[in-house]
Amino acid sequence: SDTLRAIVQDKLAHLSTLLAQRFGANVETDDAVTDEILRRATRSENGARMLESIIDGALLPPLSLKLLQKISAAEPVSRICIGVDAGEFVSVVEG
């Protein structure tokens, strides 16, 4: 629904803002991310309650790992790209 899409887009915009503030990085989120979150949420009977669970449980862990690797190597983070490949969330963190 349009309401769920707006909620997802708002949550992703908030995440992008947090990442940009924390790392000073340009954050790009592909439209396919919103579509994939909605696809997963609508498979569940929980609907909107699943949105945060999907973001926290599927989207953030691999991104967080890449960011931690950059931080531990004392490498800069200038660009963060979040997308979807073959139904899985993917992220690229560039210095």
Image: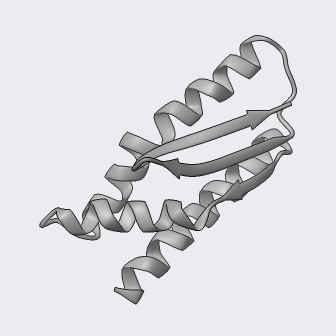
- Considering every residue shown, the one lying at the far left of the view is 45
Name the image quarter holding residue 68. top right
Name the image quarter holding residue 39. bottom left
Quadrant the C terminus occupies = top right
| Image point (29%, 70%), residue name | 48
Q: Position of residue 10 (x, y in %)?
A: 55, 72
Name the image quarter holding residue 52. bottom left
For residue 69, side relative to residue 36 (left or right): right
- Considering every residue shown, the one lying at the far bottom of the view is 2
Q: Measured along the vertical axis of the image, is residue 68 above or below residue 11?
A: above
Quadrant the N terminus occupies = bottom left
For residue 63, side relative to residue 16 (left or right): left
| Image point (44%, 78%), residue name | 5
Q: Measured along the vertical axis of the image, is residue 10 above or below residue 57?
A: below
| Image point (39%, 42%), residue name | 58
Q: Position of residue 7 (x, y in %)?
A: 45, 75
Q: Measured along the vertical axis of the image, is residue 66 above or below residue 63?
A: above
For residue 6, side relative to residue 23 (left or right): left
Q: Position of residue 63 (x, y in %)?
A: 58, 35
- Considering every residue shown, the one lying at the far top of the view is 73
For residue 50, side relative to residue 85 (left or right): left
The type of colouring in the image is: one colour
Q: Position of residue 23 (x, y in %)?
A: 80, 39
| Image point (41%, 88%), residue name | 2
Which residue is at the front of the view, 10 or 85?
85
